[in-house]
Amino acid sequence: MSVYLVKLNSVTKRFFYLLNVWVCLMLPVTAFCGKDSTNTEQRLLFIPNAFTPNYDGVNDVFKIVNLENEKVEHFRVFNRWGTVMYESSGNEAAWDGTYKGKLQEQGDYGYVIIIRFPNNVTEVYKGVIHLMKN
């Protein structure tokens, strides 16, 4: 199952991908984008919660799926002990599940991603990515 969180003005939608079917849950959000409530902007970033670095061409790397005019200022993945497994910037940032050339164990890894939007607002996204092995 993949879960994607999407911000649309003052509504957050959570998308679940199960068996080739998209399910959408709408959740209200009290926070606004920017400093005043009239400065809202559509945010459509898809950050997966799992990937399978098995070189089959499907979900082989952890990355933000649909960047357009946004800029990745910082992309960091770390293990449960706080060791940085991957660090980069730029819109091509993508973790392939390796650290020092070695594929890491299946499990959960934390991430912090900083995105700058076209209106110069930056947002920090923190979460957990699950590295899956077959």
Image: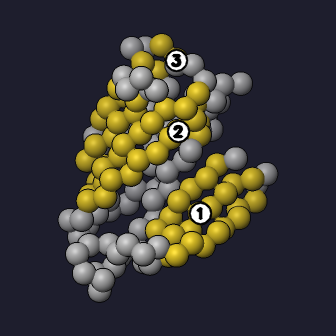
Residue depicted at 52% across the width and 17% down the height: 103
Q: Disc number at residue 103?
A: 3
Q: Earlier in the sequence, mark 3 or mark 2?
A: 3
Give the labeled residue for mark 2.
Answer: 129
The one of 6 and 118 positioned closer to us in this rendering? 6
Q: Residues within 10 Å of mark 1 (few under 14, many from 20)?
A: some
Give the labeled residue for mark 1.
Answer: 14
Q: What amino acid does circle 2 point to?
A: Ile
Q: Where in the figure is residue 40, as x and y percent of width and height?
A: 33, 79
Is 88 positioned to the left or the right of 11 in the image? left
Q: Between marks 1 and 3, how big is the CA–CA gap?
A: 30 Å
Q: Residues within 10 Å of mark 2 (few under 14, many from 20)?
A: some
Cβ–Cβ below 8 Å for labels 3 and 2?
A: no
Residue depicted at 66% across the width and 25% down the height: 133
Residue depicted at 37% across the width and 26% down the height: 82
Q: Is residue 95 above or below residue 41?
A: above
Name the quadrant containing residue 68.
bottom left
